[in-house]
Amino acid sequence: MNIVDTAAGNPAFSTLVSAIKAANLGQALAANGPFTVFAPTNEAFAKLPAGTVEDLVLPANKDKLTKILKLHVVSGKHMASEFTGKTADIATLGGEKVTVTGKDGSVHVGKAKVSSADLNASNGVIHVIDTVMMPA
């Protein structure tokens, strides 16, 4: 199963999957890749101010939503072990860089903590994060 199918099969990602559909990114994320996706859970989306998700999935906000989602995707398959004891700036598909830090047995992407790492998909890997990252 590809990244989109893997996410769709996990109830913790239903908000993310809805956002991917609203931004018309499903086909791109189902492509060959490989990709690394830092995937916010439903709980991560729930931390956003009330009404944010509902606002972002409106057709008028597709560009903004796309920019946010692309901040969560990088080219290549990056396993969590790559970041053990390191800090790396990685370019996202949205053109911005995210800082990934592996320290004290955990991995952080910006301010988000990876709560579950290395969920393999046929076209890459998913790392579950606890916070939705926002563009600068």
Image (cartoon, helix red, strand yellow):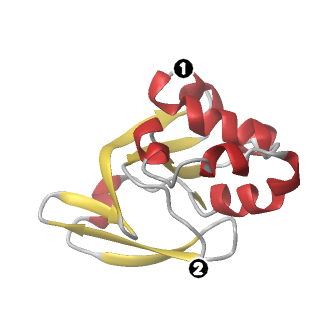
The nearer-to-camera label among 1 and 2 is: 2
**Vertical position of residue 131 compared to residue 57: above or below:** below
The residue that disc 1 covers is 9
Horizontal side, residue 78 vs residue 33: left or right: left
Q: Residue at x 70, y 43 (%)?
A: 29
Q: Residue at x 20, y 58 (%)?
A: 106
Residue type at the position of mark 1: Gly
First of labels 1, 2 by sequence position? 1
Q: Residue at x 51, y 32 (%)?
A: 13
**Vertical position of residue 109 compared to residue 3: above or below:** below
User: Secondary structure beneath disc 1?
Assistant: loop
Viewer-closest of 16 and 82:
16
Horizontal side, residue 7 vs residue 60: left or right: left
Query: Percent position (x, y) of residue 12?
Result: 45, 29
Horizontal side, residue 31 vs residue 44: left or right: right
- Crowd class of label 2 (few under 14; some 14 to 19; many from 20; radius 10 Å): few
Residue 122 visible from this viewpoint:
no
Which mark is drawn over residue 26? none
Residue situated furthest front in the rendering: 50
Query: Percent position (x, y) of residue 15?
Result: 58, 35
The residue that disc 2 covers is 136
Query: Percent position (x, y) of residue 107?
Result: 28, 60
Residue 107 visible from this viewpoint:
yes
Q: Residue at x 71, y 63 (%)?
A: 67
